[in-house]
Amino acid sequence: MLAGAVAYRLLAGRAVPDHWLVCGARGTILVWLAGQATARSGDGLRELDRSSSGSLPFDPVGFTTGIAVPDRDAAPGLALLERSRDEVARTVAEHWSELVAPQTPVERVGELFGVPVSPPVPAEEAPVCGG
């Protein structure tokens, strides 16, 4: 999905690797940014979320390359799509450096925006994140 690749480049400052799992606040913001691409992008992401399992994939159809965001990190991004774009954008702009830092946990998104964040999975089940 082109919107995901563009959003990744904005927040990571580089092109998407072959396959990358984008976690934490960075993944949440990637989902929200991709949802801004067109008037129907948010609906498309929600539909994609309903038909996927474990993560929200941004892979081009028929390919095994691209990026994905674990469900735990994607859910707050989908919730942010329900809010006023201007309201969310203002907070994203104020906290950009923190929100796109690879080490910022998704819990920080919950604190800043008041959106629910699922409890973490056990360490042995946690996804291996790269982006």
Image (spheres, helix red, strand yellow):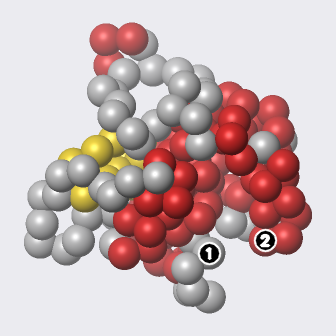
Disc 1 crowd rating (10 Å Cα; few below 14, some 14-19, many 20+) is: some
Residue 79's tag is none
Left or right relative to 63: residue 105? right
- Marked residue nearer the N-terminal end (2 or 1): 1
Tell me if residue 65 comes above or below residue 102 in the rendering: below
Can you tell which quarter of the image residue 50 is in? bottom left
Q: What residue type is disc 1 on?
A: Gln
Q: Dividing the image into 4 quarters, which one contains the C terminus?
A: top left
Q: Quadrant of residue 58?
A: bottom left
**What's the residue type where badge 2 is placed?**
Arg
> Which residue is depicted at the point 42% across and 13% down?
122
Q: Is residue 77 left or right of residue 126?
A: right
Number of numbered discs: 2
Work out whether residue 109 or residue 10 is closer to the camera in this orientation and state it.
Answer: 10
At a point 45% along the width and 20% down the height, the residue shown is: 121
Q: Where is residue 111? Give x, y as percent.
A: 81, 33
Camera-side residue of 23 and 115:
23
Helix, strand or loop under label 2: helix
Residue 85 is marked as 2
Measured as percent of width and height from the top left, residue 21 is found at: 33, 41
Instruction: Using the image, tell me which numbered label, if any, was put on residue 36.
Output: 1
Q: Check whether the beta carbons of the residues at disc 2 and disc 1 lie within 8 A of each other.
A: yes
